[in-house]
Image (cartoon, rainbow, N blue to C red):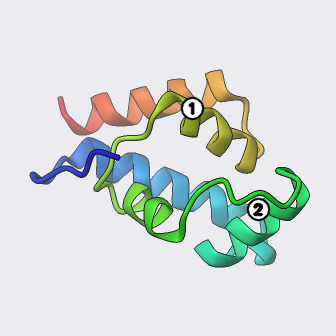
Amino acid sequence: MVERKQYDPGLVRIGELITQKRKALGDPYNTREKFIAQTSKDIFGGKEWVSVRHLANLELGKNWISIEKFIILADALQQEPVSLFKEFIDAYRNENS
């Protein structure tokens, strides 16, 4: 996990997108804790796939995400990874141009 020491508006925008997509899944996902618990149960066979702290850091734009975690996150958000990645790229570029 790489935590950014400097504010990066592109990462903050990506974090906002993650939060919006999580909350759009409905009430069982409205908190990070519920989202992790529910997706762990429903999608990942009960395995914890991310910590609350790591998800918070992603949603707050403090961390970059690894490719492995990105693919898992896309599954948890019920998004096609390629489309989600393109959306993240566009958001990052728009905020940092």
Residue drawn at point x = 17 percent, y = 29 percent: 97
Residue drawn at point x = 66 percent, y = 28 percent: 81
Residue drawn at point x = 32 percent, y = 54 percent: 61
Disc 2: which residue: 25
- Give the amino acid at mark 1: Glu
Residue 46 position by quadrant: bottom right
Q: Position of residue 72 (x, y in %)?
A: 67, 40
Residue 51 position by quadrant: bottom right
Q: CA distance from mark 2 to mark 1?
A: 22 Å
Q: Position of residue 64 (x, y in %)?
A: 34, 41
- Give the amino acid at mark 2: Leu
Q: Position of residue 45 (x, y in %)?
A: 89, 54
Above or below, comparing residue 60 to residue 69 in the picture: below
Q: Position of residue 14 (x, y in %)?
A: 41, 46
Question: What label sits on residue 68 in the rendered view?
Answer: 1
Q: Is residue 19 left or right of residue 65?
A: right
